[in-house]
Structure formats: structure tokens, C-alpha cells
Amino acid sequence: MSARVVVAVGLPGSGKSTYFSRLGVNPISSDAIRLQLADDENEQSIHARVFATVRYLLRHRIALHRPVTYIDATNLTRQDRRQFIKIARESGCRIEAIYFDVPLEICKVRNAARGRIVPEHALDLMAAKLVPPSVEEGFDRVTIADGGSV
């Protein structure tokens, strides 16, 4: 059985990190990398560095023959997800997406209750960009999580 790369897709507050926590796994997290690099998981000016680091860590986990690597980031667009699909394919890994299909209004309520709050206008812009993942873009499988119980 080949290794798998599992990419989370969803708005802030849709339950991605909670899902991974409940699963008991240690995903590669863009927020955790922001915290490591800039001492602030809200720091958005280092986006390119953060995702270069995500890809670097993914490649190393694959080289270390880890059976499953989870990517915890919003991954809202096909362009955001393209590099993960490419790395998985080049490495002979299966590539899967978990789509957190949670209404924007629920994400806003959850977001307001979190310690790290994404501005509401930013959530609106992100929701407008969101393209659900699909097998057609290159995933072997797409699982939909409604986020209701995460």
C-alpha cells in the first residue's frame, strides 16, 4: 500500500484542526509554521515562506516513508492545492482531500468564539474564493465532512 497525502479544505472555523486533533494525528499546519517562523500564527505577510515550509516538510515525510501525511490549511483554491497533488503524484503517493463543507455563518460563529479570530471581512473574501476539491483536479478521493460534530 502506498503512502497517502490528505489535504484539508475549508474555511477558518470549519473544524479542520479540531478534526485532526480528535483523530489523534499531527498534521503539517500552516498556522503552526507561522507561529514557528514569526512567533505569530496570524502573520500573513510570510505566506510564501510558510507554504514553502509545508511542501518541504511534506517531501521529507514522504522520504521517511510515513504512511499518511495530513495538511492542515484552508487550501481554498485549485491553485492552492496543485503543488500537493504534484508532490504526491511524483512521489507515488495517493492524494486525498477532506472537504469541510460548513456554512459561512457557522464558521463565523465558531471563529468569533476562538482565541485567534479571523476578521469577518477576510472570512467573506475567503468564502468567495472557495472551490470545493474534486477528483477531476487530481485527487484520488474526496471525503466531505459536514463539520457538524467536529
Image: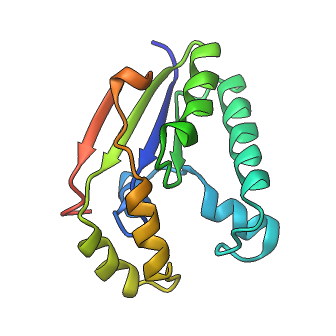
Image spot of residue 95 (x, y percent): 47, 25
Compared with 131, 15 (above or below) is below
Q: Quadrant of residue 14?
A: bottom left
* Camera-nearest residue between 30 and 63: 30
Residue 12 visible somewhere in the drawing = yes
* Camera-nearest residue between 104 and 117: 104
* Camera-nearest residue between 132 and 20: 132
Compared with 7, 147 (above or below) is below
Image spot of residue 87 (x, y percent): 64, 24
In the picture, the quarter occupied by the C terminus is bottom left
Q: Is residue 149 left or right of residue 89?
A: left
**Count of residue discs:** 0
In the picture, the quarter occupied by the N terminus is top left
Give the residue displayed 80% in from the left and 71% down from the top. Answer: 38
**What coloring was used for the rendering?**
rainbow
Give the residue displayed 29% in from the left and 68% down from the top. Answer: 104
Image spot of residue 120 (x, y percent): 43, 81
Q: Quadrant of residue 16?
A: bottom left
Give the residue displayed 31% in from the left and 32% down from the top. Answer: 142
Q: Is residue 16 left or right of residue 27?
A: left
Compared with 98, 64 (above or below) is above
Image spot of residue 128 (x, y percent): 39, 59
Residue 140 visible somewhere in the drawing = no
